[in-house]
């Protein structure tokens, strides 16, 4: 089957300019792309036909040969001026890569003029320590970040005021150069401009042609309630400015939580150790404990509470990120032995001891009973 006319494939007139060609091919390539037409062989063939037509017509030398000789310029092993190798002289590999970049570069972060992606500024990291209370309620912090910003003298172009970068004479603004090696066409980044497509004839005296200068930037960071240790917050476009108008990088804030004097965090829950008097543990009573929101909570201590007993305060723990829920607060009581007793207090404790110990200290009585059994067995 004879090939269709390339202009007819793209639906453009023979005298159409580069922009009109690109607009027509992008529309058709998006329509017939294999990802949108999985399993459709007709669409796949149409996509290849569109790519082949555009690869020829977008290249001035190939287009001139096609306008003069038609498809015969690329058949029977003839490659025509500047044509690539492959079936019918069509350099599908290189052409497809160009087409993919043009179609999807904007969505994949590769859009814009040649060299812009390679000139992208670096991402930055900033370590920020916050209090547990700030992690509970959320806060806004001011940070100062030393970074590279767009040069005010040249507005990021890298060229001295009153001048403009010019098209690279090596690649004529394409950012890439092609070299013929036997049957293959090799495409590589232009050595003259580093892929930017443009060169600076008169560099800016402020930034030396970089298009950026060093400066400390002050930023506000919104920290949501419920963040955990190690949470990363991304500030898009707040990293280093790109070289000569390249897109800026991002700033990543890494959070760490400072140790708290009362609470230890366990996910959404909080742990707290609270000492209680021996008399309260023995007779029972009420104690007040702090909570992370700044209020106080009461705990009822049953008579005979032992050291290490744990009490749960539901909903008094940490906030949960992007949720109205809260964790729990666990209070572990530690029975405190009194010190610096007066003579009267010592006498009262001795009277208590003389009154009898049986049944009042079940754990210690049980422990020493087992010890006596062990000693008896050893004697036998």
Image (cartoon, grey):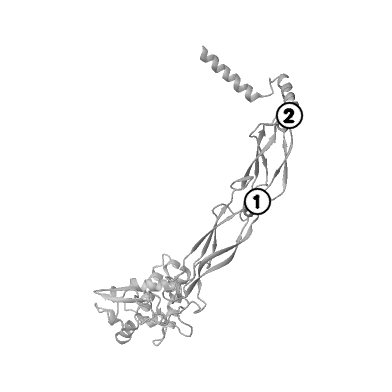
The image position of residue 48, as x and y in percent, is 37, 72
Q: Is residue 16 left or right of residue 253?
A: left
Residue at 27% in and 76% down: 180
Q: Secondary structure at mark 1?
A: strand
- Mark 2 Cα shell of 10 Å, populated few (<14), some (14-19), many (≥20): few
The image position of residue 273, as x and y in percent, is 64, 40
Residue 48 to residue 167: above or below: above
- Mark 1 Cα shell of 10 Å, populated few (<14), some (14-19), many (≥20): few
Q: Which residue is mark 2?
A: 342
Q: Is residue 119 left or right of residue 271?
A: left
Report the front residue among 327 and 104: 327
The image position of residue 265, as x and y in percent, is 60, 46
Residue 157 to residue 324: above or below: below
Q: CA distance from mark 2 to mark 1?
A: 50 Å
Q: Secondary structure at mark 2?
A: loop
Residue at far top of view: 380
Residue at 71% in and 29% down: 341
Residue 185 to residue 362: above or below: below
Q: Quadrant of residue 372?
A: top right
Task: Return the mark for residue 325.
Answer: 1
Q: Is residue 31 visible?
A: no
The image position of residue 56, as x and y in percent, is 34, 79
Q: Earlier in the sequence, mark 2 or mark 1?
A: 1
On-image quarter of the N terminus: bottom left
């Amino acid at each position: 089957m004879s090939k269709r006319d390339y202009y007819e494939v793209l639906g453009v007139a023979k005298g159409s300019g580069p922009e009109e060609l690109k607009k027509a091919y992008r529309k058709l390539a998006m329509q017939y792309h294999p990802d949108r037409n999985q399993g459709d062989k007709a669409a796949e063939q149409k996509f290849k036909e569109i790519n082949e037509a555009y690869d020829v017509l977008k290249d001035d030398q190939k287009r001139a040969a096609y306008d003069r000789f038609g498809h015969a310029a690329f058949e029977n092993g003839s490659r025509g001026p500047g044509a690539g190798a492959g079936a019918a002289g069509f350099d599908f590999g290189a052409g497809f890569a160009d087409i993919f970049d043009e179609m999807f570069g904007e969505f994949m972060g590769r859009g814009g003029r040649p060299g812009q992606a390679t000139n992208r500024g670096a991402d930055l990291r900033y370590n920020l320590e916050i209090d547990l209370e700030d992690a509970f309620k959320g806060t806004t912090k001011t940070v100062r970040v030393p970074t590279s910003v767009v040069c005010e003298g040249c507005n990021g172009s890298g060229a001295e005021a009153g001048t403009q970068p010019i098209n690279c004479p090596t690649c004529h603004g394409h950012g890439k150069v092609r070299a013929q090696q036997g049957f293959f066409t090799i495409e590589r980044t232009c050595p003259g401009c580093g892929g930017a497509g443009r060169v600076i004839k008169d560099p800016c005296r402020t930034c030396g042609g970089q298009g950026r200068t060093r400066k400390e930037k002050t930023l506000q960071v919104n920290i949501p309630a419920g963040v955990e240790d190690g949470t990363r917050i991304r500030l898009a476009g707040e990293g280093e400015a790109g070289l000569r108008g390249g897109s800026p990088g991002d700033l990543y804030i890494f959070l760490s939580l400072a140790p708290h004097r009362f609470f230890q965090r366990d996910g959404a829950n909080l742990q707290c150790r609270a000492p209680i008097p021996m008399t309260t543990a023995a007779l029972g009573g009420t104690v007040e404990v702090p909570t992370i929101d700044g209020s106080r909570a009461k705990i009822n201590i049953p008579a005979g509470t032992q050291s290490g007993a744990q009490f749960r305060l539901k909903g008094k723990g940490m906030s949960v990120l992007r949720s109205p829920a809260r964790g729990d607060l666990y209070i572990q009581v530690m029975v405190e032995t009194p010190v610096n007793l007066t003579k009267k207090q010592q006498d009262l404790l001795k009277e208590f001891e003389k009154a009898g110990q049986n049944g009042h200290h079940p754990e210690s009585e049980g422990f020493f009973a087992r010890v006596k059994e062990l000693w008896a067995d050893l004697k036998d």
